[in-house]
Amino acid sequence: MIKAGQIDKGMGLLIKGAPFVVVEREFVNPGKGSAFVRLKLKSPTTGQTLQETIKSQDSVEDIEVVDRNYQYSYNDGEYFHMMDEASYEDVSVPMKTFEGYEFIMREGDSYRCTTYNDEIIDIQVPSKMVYLVADAEEAIKGDTVQGATKFVTTETGLRVRVPIFIKQGEKIRVNTETREYLERVND
């Protein structure tokens, strides 16, 4: 059991008998009344999100989670197939739990994953990643308006709005949380 005031982002909690990961945490101390913690939780098994408000002096049941490195092998349209780098064991993770991750995770890359009862409940993707531009629209000659942009598709299938000077075959750095272009990367 853990006091609500000690809950942190990324922790695992048992809410109504099901495991949840804390996605967002906000501590609120109103002028009147007792302080409370507002939580946004995500179920690793169903992908369901839940909002909970808990008084800071109340306790909730925390769960034992373990962080391990997994290599992303591939996805088959329904599951991500990951390999535990320590035991070389293959694990299948439902894609619906991590919707949109198929466009930001790169095959062969390693990711830190949080597990509960040997199930992956969270995949920690770096906030910035470099991608190869696989397909880029041609810039229209004379389109030199300040801040002109176009869409490109990366090798993972991620569509990103970029400045018009980005070409196919170049590398770009992307914020994986907002999926926005940050900069061109020169090797």
Image: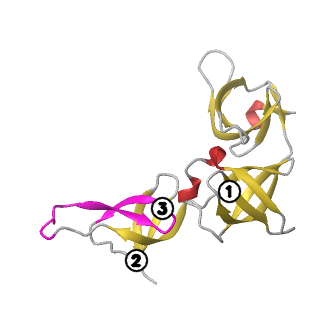
Amino acid type indicated by mark 2: Glu
Q: Which of the colour schemes (rainbow, by chain, secondary structure, one colour) is used?
A: secondary structure
Locate residue 99, reporting x and y percent.
58, 47
In the image: residue 126, left or right of residue 93? left
The 10 Å Cα crowd at callout 1, few under 14, some 14 to 19, many 20 or more, is many
In the image: residue 127, left or right of residue 95? left
Please report the bounds of the magenta region as a residue range: 141-163
Locate residue 168, reporting x and y percent.
36, 75
Amino acid type indicated by mark 1: Phe
Q: What element carries label 2?
A: loop
Q: What element carries label 3?
A: loop
Report which residue position mark 3 lands on: 157
Amino acid type indicated by mark 3: Gly
Q: Quadrant of residue 12?
A: top right
- Camera-near label (2 vs 1) is 1
Report which residue position mark 1 lands on: 80
Q: Considering only order in the chain, which callout, 1 or 2, is on the residue closer to the N terminus?
A: 1
Q: What element carries label 1?
A: strand
Q: Nearer the viewer, residue 119 or 6?
A: 119
Q: Which residue is drawn at 79% across and 25% down?
A: 16
Report which residue position mark 2 lands on: 170
17 is higher (above) or lower (below) than 108: above
Q: Residue at x 23, y 60 (%)?
A: 147
The 10 Å Cα crowd at callout 3, few under 14, some 14 to 19, many 20 or more, is some
